[in-house]
Amino acid sequence: MNILELRHIQYHYNGKKILDIPSIGIERGQIYGLVGPNGSGKTTLLSIMSLILKPTAGQVIYEAKPVYYDHKSLTTLRSSMTMVLQNPYLFHTSVGKNVAYGLKVRKFSKKERESRIKEALHLVGLDDFERRGARQISGGETQLVALARALALKPHILFLDEPTANVDTRHVHRLERIIDRINQELDTTIVITTHNLTQAYRLTDRVLSLFNGSLVPSTMYNLFSGRILIKDEGPLFDTGKIGIWISPDSGASDADHVTIDPEDIIVSKKPFESSARNLFEGTISKIVDQGGKIALEVQSREIFHVWITEISFREMGLNIGSKIYLTFKASSVHIL
């Protein structure tokens, strides 16, 4: 069952269309990831979902009822959802009082506030932080306190805008574990924006890709900008560094972005003999075990991201620095 639905949503700013979303359904108890390049509309969409922004056109449905944007209706609905910003602000007071802020605004009793503060800090692993000064903690801990402040309200939906963008690697993994725990133990529906595609696919149940304010089917890995050139051999997408053959059936002539699904790229130790027209030599610069598959970052004249099975990875004996060949069909190149 969907806890939240967006239907025919548009958002305009200064006469320009920023978002155009036909429909999105957010299923109760799931984790969703919103991904896309800068300027794709992720934060705007998150703000509309969390009822901070009113769409220019379209309808938001919450708990199977249309949202009306009068003050009374919004106050009631917003009490069941919370948003944590990328750069959260903490007051110049203790961690405990920061966590208590939303509870005081909602006029919870002192006893209930104390109980919820302890519970929320425990959920994010900051049990002994209640009396610490909020300005005396690290950036990663600041994000955890902001998350605890949101959790103290026990929201049905938790919105997180780039929650790991400004924290160190140690706190990234800690935050990811906490997000998963919140979802599993509290059955909280969570929507996250992130630039980290690997994180999105590892952490969420479903990934929604945004590009220029619209939902696109591509994973948004291997996103290249450039222009289409018409050659005797067929259309070629020129990035300025490499040329990528695209399908003549694409019908595109003025597209300025393409993507290639990481699973559509064949990895080999020697040039792969096939009818596929795109072949690039590269060097493995990063390896990430995603549980069941291996994600490779490959340095060629452009950076490619590729997914292969653990079996293939072991059989080829790949490591950081291994030279490999990447092969993919022109029909695997998606025009945006």
Image: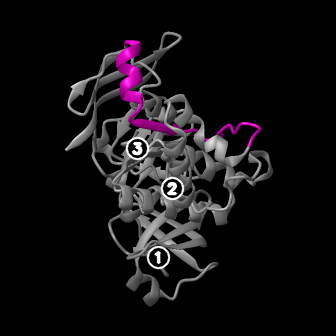
Q: Is residue 256 shown to the viewer in this render?
A: no
- Badge 3, how many Cα within 10 Å: few under 14, some, many 20+? many
Q: Disc 3 or 2, which lies upstream in sequence?
A: 2
Report the colour scheme.
one colour
Q: Is residue 107 shown to the viewer in this render?
A: yes
Quadrant that contains the N terminus: top left
Would you name the residue on which mark 3 appears?
209
What secondary structure is marked by label 3? strand
Q: In the depicted view, which residue is nearer to us: 288 or 49?
A: 49
Q: Position of residue 10 (x, y in %)?
A: 37, 20
> In front of the other: label 3 or label 2?
2
Quote the CA–CA distance across marks 1 and 2.
Answer: 57 Å
Residue in view at x 50 percent, y 60 percent = 178
Quote the CA–CA distance across marks 3 and 1.
Answer: 32 Å
- Type of amino acid under label 2: Glu
Residue in view at x 41 percent, y 42 percent = 155
* Span colored in magenta: 70-93
Vertical order, 166 against 252 (above or below): below
